[in-house]
Image (tube, rainbow, N blue to C red):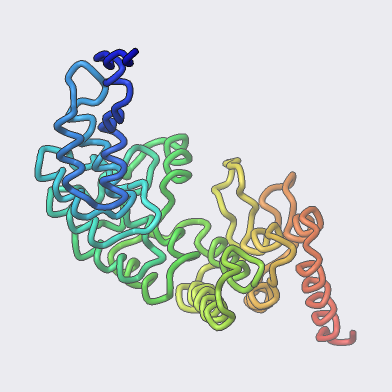
Amino acid sequence: MSSPAPTASTSVSSAAPPQRPRALILTACQTDDVSLISQALSLASSDSRDTVPELLSRAVTQSIRRNATNVLTYVLNHGAEVPAYSSLNIEDHSKAIFEILVAHGWDINARRPGDRPLLWEVVGDGDLVAWCLDHGATAIPNDLGPASDDERRKDEYGCPPLLEVAASQSTVATFELLRSKGAQLGRRTLHFAARAAIKSGDREGEQPQMLDKDRAKLHSERMAVVVHLVDALGLDPNALDQPAGWSLGNHWGTPLCYVAHSNPNWDCSEVVTFLLQKGADPGLVMDPAGWDAVELARRSKNQRFLDLIEDWKANRLERKPGA
């Protein structure tokens, strides 16, 4: 007896399911394949979430994230909207992506309230900083100017002064380029620079894969910024990190307090020695209820810092007349 002929339903179930538009968009951005974008848009449906505008928006986001320049150019030329803000969800900042966006009317300075413009995100890359400045980036957010202390607290947390960010990531040359464009110092400029000089000097820090010569170069750059801030710009080694009467989280007091509160495995000897030589006081507290650098070091179990302070105190006693 012969087998029955396959029914229509049997034929359909054995066929490969059609690829979903969103999956096509993702693959297109992973491979930078414009033809897959065309396929995805042809499958768009007005009665589902996969509409043409939604797919175009998704393609913009994914192509920026994955550095898919061909896809980004294609969708922007076919009706996709340029991102409204300059802060992008992107791991590796790409000048090619930025050039495409700027060519399509992207506002390099636009930001959400309390967020950072693009320039804040690239301060560690001197070439990108120069490119951004050449393409209209401003060193002070265009909308900055909050009236009340509460607004200032909120905005400085999300978008601190640019040089406060640059101090821990930039070279002296890039820092000075930004300063020449009007970038402002912040209350924690020296604090962050000092902390960055410790981190970059430790092979167990954030970049353990770095070669020793690269790590040494980075540490030299970070210490150069600390020295520049104190010797060239005259920043106070005892500066407090917030105005009197404020009580912000993760604010520890003086630059030495930030060093003391850091990872006890980090080598802080060079930056601590420099700050002490420039008049930093390890006993200075932010307010009567606060902790000084020594107490913060004890609570952080930062024995290296405590040993440096003890040696410094002993040397001061030896130098005193009649000691």
- Residue at the spot x=16%, y=43% of the render? 75
Give x and y (percent) for residue 253: 64, 54
Q: Disc count in the image?
A: 0
151 vs 218, nearest the viewer:
218
Left or right for 209, reference 290: left
Give x and y (percent) for residue 83: 23, 42
Q: Is residue 143 visible?
A: no
Left or right for 186, reference 57: right
Give x and y (percent) for residue 121: 38, 55
State which quadrant residue 173 falls in. bottom left
Left or right for 207, reference 134: right
- Residue at the spot x=82%, y=72% of the render? 307
Left or right for 252, reference 46: right
State which quadrant residue 265 falls in. bottom right
- Where the C terminus falls, by quadrant? bottom right
Name of the residue lying farthest toward the right: 323
Above/below status of 217 relative to 289 = below
- Residue at the spot x=50%, y=61% of the render? 189
Give x and y (percent) for residue 36: 20, 43
Name of the residue lying farthest toward the front: 1
Above/below status of 320 relative to 124 = below
Q: Is residue 219 visible?
A: yes
Above/below status of 187 relative to 53 = below
- Where the N terminus falls, by quadrant? top left
Above/below status of 321 relative to 292 = below
267 vs 317, nearest the viewer:
267
